[in-house]
């Protein structure tokens, strides 16, 4: 269950007595759940978006027990209609939206060769186009009110790629480029784009991995390498960053008057980013092979 944090002084404009309004996608567990509760604890009227409201019991219980301005809202980032309806509901009830955290996503695992076109498209539909839908729905209101914070939860995997996650890395690399470009366009309206780049996080994200159908065949030429890589990631997960630490970074970013574009979260992410910066491609590839694949 999320831990309460010291309440930050919110430094952006609202009418007297109004709460800041935040929407967090992928809030049924992990980073989304922790962020939703932490923002509510710090004064935001928080909408925690889930695809299925039946899976929002933890959210509802926390909101009721701690008397938080936190409510679950049904939202499927893959659906234009669902996104439009959710944003419309938030605006009807509050007339504003100050913070959006695009956290919904999953990872498709398997050799690129064995990943079908439909599986790859589905990966992009959720991880990339889901964030696009939310941003395009929220931006008009943020521009009108002259303020906004859009947080896109990327990954170490948006800057560095590892084997057997090619589609996932594709979505995160795309989200990084999209976010960096949008920042130039919207900062004139008082809107900041923020990228959060966690390393390995201890959450249900790993329980929700989707294996490419063909990757499960016993005669796959990639089978031995996949097994070794999986063992390498299991080892990394043991020392992963708790999701509440990611939530604290998000809170700090959205309450900062001048947030950074990128926030790296976790010792593993920071170490690998620094190593990548100081190595040639060939040198870094050897590091990955030695520490993950072998």
Image (cartoon, rainbow, N blue to C red):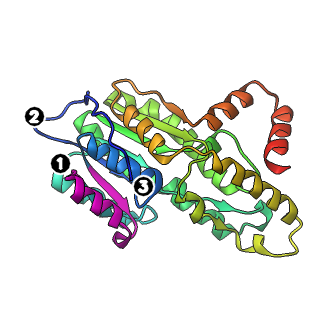
In this figure, which residue is indicated by the disc labeled 1? 95
The answer to whether residue 189 of the structure is visible from this angle is: yes
Q: Depth-wise, is mark 1 or mark 2 nearer the camera?
A: 2
Q: Is residue 63 magenta?
A: yes
Separation (CA) of disc 1 from disc 2: 14 Å
* Bounds of the magenta segment: 46-69
Residue farthest left in this picture? 16
Determine whether label 3 and label 1 are within 8 Å by CB. no
How far is mark 2 from mark 3, CA to CA? 31 Å
Sooner in the amino-acid sequence: mark 2 or mark 3: 2
Q: Is residue 103 visible?
A: no
Give the residue drawn at x 67%, y 56%: 167
From the viewer's perspective, is 277 left or right of 25?
right
**Circle nearer the N terminus (3, 1):** 1
**Residue at left offset 61%, top offset 63%:** 209
- Density class for disc 2 (Cα within 10 Å; few <14, some 14-19, many ≥20) is few
Q: Which residue is mark 2?
A: 16
Task: Give the answer, above or below, for where 55 lies relative to 233.
Answer: below
187, 201: nearer the viewer: 201
Residue 26 on image: x %, y %: 43, 57
Residue at 85%, 66% (x, y): give it: 223
Check contact, mark 1 vs mark 2: CB within 8 A.
Answer: no
Residue depth check, mark 2 versus mark 3: number of the one nearer the observer: 2
Q: Residues within 10 Å of mark 3 (few under 14, many from 20)?
A: many
Q: Nearer the viewer, residue 69 or 112?
A: 69
Q: CA distance from mark 3 to mark 1?
A: 19 Å
Q: Is residue 277 above or below residue 88?
A: above
Secondary structure at badge 3 equals helix
Q: What residue did someone put label 3 on?
A: 133
What element does badge 2 sit on? Answer: loop
């Amino acid at each position: 269950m999320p831990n309460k944090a010291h309440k930050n002084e919110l430094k952006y404009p609202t009418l007297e007595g109004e709460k800041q309004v935040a929407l967090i996608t992928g809030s049924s567990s992990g980073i989304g759940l922790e962020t939703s509760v932490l923002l509510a604890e710090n004064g935001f009227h928080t909408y925690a978006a889930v695809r299925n409201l039946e899976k929002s019991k933890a959210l509802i219980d926390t909101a009721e027990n701690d008397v938080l301005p936190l409510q679950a809202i049904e939202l499927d980032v893959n659906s234009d209609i669902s996104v439009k309806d959710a944003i419309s509901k938030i605006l009807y009830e509050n007339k504003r939206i100050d913070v959006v955290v695009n956290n919904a996503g999953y990872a498709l695992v398997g050799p690129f060769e064995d990943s079908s076109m439909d599986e790859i498209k589905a990966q992009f539909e959720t991880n990339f186009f889901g964030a696009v839908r939310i941003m395009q729905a929220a931006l008009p209101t943020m521009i009108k009110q002259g303020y906004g914070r859009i947080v896109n939860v990327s990954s170490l995997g948006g800057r560095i790629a590892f084997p057997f996650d090619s589609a996932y890395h594709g979505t995160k690399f795309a989200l990084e480029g999209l976010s960096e470009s949008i920042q130039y366009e919207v900062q004139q309206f008082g809107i900041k784009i923020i990228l959060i780049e966690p390393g390995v996080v201890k959450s249900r994200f790993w329980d929700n991995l989707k294996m490419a159908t063909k990757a499960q065949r016993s005669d796959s030429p990639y089978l031995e390498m996949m097994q070794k890589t999986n063992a390498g990631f299991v080892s990394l997960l043991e020392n992963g960053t708790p999701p509440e630490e990611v939530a604290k970074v998000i809170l700090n970013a959205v309450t900062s008057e001048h947030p950074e574009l990128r926030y790296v979260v976790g010792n593993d992410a920071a170490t690998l980013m620094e190593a990548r910066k100081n190595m040639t491609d060939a040198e870094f590839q050897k590091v990955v092979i030695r520490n993950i694949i072998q």
